[in-house]
Amino acid sequence: MGNGASASQFEISGNPCADRLFNVVDTDGSGGVSFKEVCQGVANRRSMSSKEAKLHVLFKFYDKDGDGLISMHEIAEAMQLACPGLFPKATIEQLVRSTMQNFDADKDGYLNFVEFSNLMRASGMDLSNNSI
Ligand SMILES: [Ca+2]
Ligand SMILES: [Ca+2]
């Protein structure tokens, strides 16, 4: 009697985490995710406050095809998205190549999560608080 009235309030907790994260991140409803949206999503999400969680979100942003590895092409794309028009294409290619030389520790041509973490730390990205 009268039960079930508040059931809908609990539905959101049953959503798959990925969908919820996407909804949090896709703030302009464009269906795509911009670098700015990722940063805002990370900053707004209290339960994602650990460095590790932030790195995972960033890693997913770079890893467009979701194969768990970041290719040179994916880095170049992410750079262009993060700072559109800031660098000429040739400069981005140079940056990507030197990034790979420095951080692709096992020399397989891709950055795995550990290598990516090292890159983020070295690039001075502040993951210790909410200003990513
Ligand atoms: Ca990939
Ligand atoms: Ca590697």
Image (cartoon, rainbow, N blue to C red):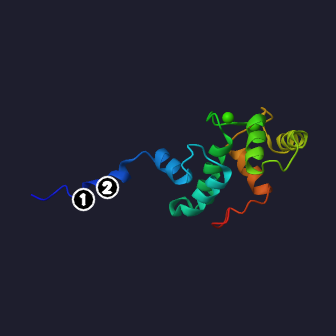
Residue drawn at x 71%, y 50% is: 117
Q: Secondary structure at mark 1?
A: loop
Q: Position of residue 116 (x, y in %)?
A: 72, 46
| Residue at x-position 75% and y-position 40% | 77
Q: Quadrant of residue 74?
A: top right
Query: From the Cβ of disc 2, is ligand 1 less than 8 Å away?
Result: no
The front one of 98 and 19 is 19
Residue 42 percent location from the top left of the image: 59, 58
Check whether the beta carbons of the residues at disc 1 and disc 2 lie within 8 A of each other: yes
Q: Name the residue located 61 percent from the left edge and 35 percent from the top edge.
A: 66
For the residue labelled by badge 2, is the local secondary structure a helix, a strand or a loop?
helix
- Answer with left or right where residue 93 lies relative to residue 132: right
Q: Which mark is residue 10?
A: 2
Report whether 40 appears left or right of 6.
right
Give the alpha-carbon distance from disc 1 to disc 2, as whole Å. Answer: 8 Å
The image quarter in which residue 10 lies = bottom left
Q: Quadrant of the N terminus?
A: bottom left
Question: Is the residue marked 1 within 8 Å of ligand 1, measured from its CB?
Answer: no
Q: Whole-percent x and y of residue 126?
A: 72, 63
Give the residue number, with chain letter if any, for mark 1. Answer: 6
Query: 103 or 65: which is nearer to us?
Result: 65
Measured as percent of width and height from the top left, residue 122 is found at 80, 55
Side of 46 where 126 appears, left or right: right
What is the three-letter code of the residue carrying label 1?
Answer: Ser
Q: What amino acid does circle 2 point to?
A: Phe
Label 2 environment density (alpha carbons within 10 Å; few <14, some 14–19, many ≥20): few
Q: Residue at x 47, y 45 (%)?
A: 19
